[in-house]
Image (spheres, rainbow, N blue to C red):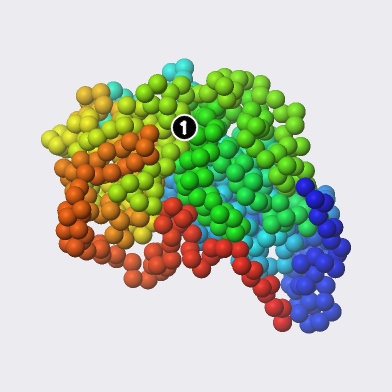
Amino acid sequence: MNAPHRKNLAELRSQRWLASDDIRGFAHRQRLQQQGLAREEFMDRPVVGIINTWSELSPCHAHLRERVQAVKRGVLQAGGYPFELPALSLGEVMVKPTTMIYRNFLAIEAEELLRSLPLDGVVLMGGCDKTTPGLVMGALSMDIPALFLPAGPMLNDRYKGQAVGAGTHTKKYWEQYSIGTIDQPEWIALEGRMTRAPGTCNTMGTASTMTSIVEAMGLALPGSTSIPAMDAGHTRMAWACGKRVVEMVWEDLKPSRFITRASFLNGLATWMALGGSTNAAVHLPAMAGRAGIPLGLDDFDAMAQRVPVIANLFPSGNRLMEDFHYAGGVPALLNKIAHVLDLGAGTVTGRSLGENIAGHVCSDDEVIRDPAAPLIVAPADCPEASMALAVVRGNLCPDGAVLKPSAATPSLLRHTGRALVFDSNAEMLAAVNDPDLDADENTVLVLRNGGPVGGPGMPEWGNLPIPKKLLKQGVRDMLRISDARMSGTHYGTCVLHVAPESAIGGPLALVRTGDLITLDIGERRLDVQLSEAEWAERRAAWTPPQQPYARGWTRIYQQQVAQADQGCDFATLAGNAPTPEPPIY
């Protein structure tokens, strides 16, 4: 990586606010002193923002209020001055209708906080699913020195001698509770113990998928993303982030100086090796778009064919993030797939990715396996079953859809079945408890109106529950199709992100109960068996669903949002065209 230009004090961005002798400079310094700061505390040094997504309703980030103190110590000891900036907190479980509808909101907030205030660099504090891409999107657009501080995963739990993690086991135990194999007292006991400390999901859900990708891209310190949230090492890492960002300011090490297409491809390889969340298929195009870098579904499928799943983590495996950390974390995993990485890619450390991971050896080959002995041994008749992602197209999804073969049932990856169509999540949830539901294990469950516009916000409805009557018969997986997303902690043969979505007239809007649908993973096809004449007749009869949102953020979102295959960013936010610095009067 080429050595960046080293700035002097006069070149710092904050000096536009603080250094002038006019009335504006006077007012800025005056107001900082109004808070009890001495002039000497903030003058003649870099000013560092700390964007903190802490909230009392975001349990994944409950510890970030304390971690920010460690960041501030690092900034101060390195000669900078820190200012904490609260930002929208997107706790996945509590925020409704879905945090996805607010990802772009957070990206706007992060970008505009950085642009409008006297900041020379920033530490981005997040981790729960949409906070990571939202913060990174804003930072890439603003393009000042930025370093991502991951919230870290929660601690492990044990239940009847087995490792238990958030999300994956919640779904598993709910199925058992719903058919009576777990009673209510046991269910209540699980509720109070399965998530036993602050931090993000400890499975390889969307949170750890995205933070690991960001580390592999070079935007986080090496090894930082797997440190458990409540480990003392997490506090030390926060201090190191504060210390390092000050040096990044002097080095003018902003994202545009080292983030390239190679950085994103390194992130892709990491995603596949981890068996990570399908949600990354929405976030990565949006992030890359902010950097002006082309990246899309075909890149994802191509990388999935090159890199097998080697991380033994739920939902594809049977271990948790704490185990992954002890085994060596992301640096150890990257060394095992170094042959597919661009080791010369730059990072926030000022060193190359290869230099960052040198010497990081895996200490547990059962948790981080060798590519020659991957986690998933695919059956001979379905070699695709070992892949972390597959992209399908066809007359149901001409712009693409995704699924996670490594967490699916191989026999369902080549399947034809009769469609059972639901027009809403509420309709579907009511129907699956009907003991007389017209469905068997071969039925293809279809949920529409769950996309970016239709949801709205593309909620995590795509892991449609198995009908109760079939659960009682022992059925644990079915082919399920939707234009919604799925939690990264979940599993099953679920085709997701169908594009274009049904609410804007995509083909999914025209499917009817009883139609025959075929998934062929080998051919990467998803088709419904209809004649052209039938398609045309249904198209002519279709009318768009009424949307009740006449104003507010949701209305803005529905008018601006791109489709899933393009990353669901807003047209007015995408791209890397320069935005002028604010005038100071």
Give coordinates of residue 85: x percent, y percent: 64, 59
Q: How many dots with numbers?
A: 1
Q: Quadrant of residue 67?
A: top right
What residue occupies the far top of the structure in this picture?
161
Give coordinates of residue 221: x percent, y percent: 70, 42
At horizontal 38% and vertical 39% (from top left) the residue drawn is 524
For this rendering, which residue is in front, 58 or 382? 382
Which secondary structure lies at badge 1?
loop
For the residue carrying disc 1, how many other residues have a C-alpha within 10 Å: few (<14), some (14-19), or many (20+)? many
173, above or below 373, in the image: below
Give coordinates of residue 24: x percent, y percent: 76, 79
- On screen, residue 563 versus residue 32, left or right, reads left
At horizontal 30% and vertical 56% (from top left) the residue drawn is 506
Q: Mark 1 sits on what residue?
A: 387
Give coordinates of residue 191: x percent, y percent: 41, 33
Evaluate whether residue 258 shows in this view: yes
At horizontal 36% and vertical 46% (from top left) the residue drawn is 393
233, above or below 397, in the image: above
30, above or below 367, in the image: below
* Placement of the C terminus among the 4 image quadrants: bottom right
Evaluate whether residue 497 shows in this view: no
Q: Amino acid at mark 1?
A: Met
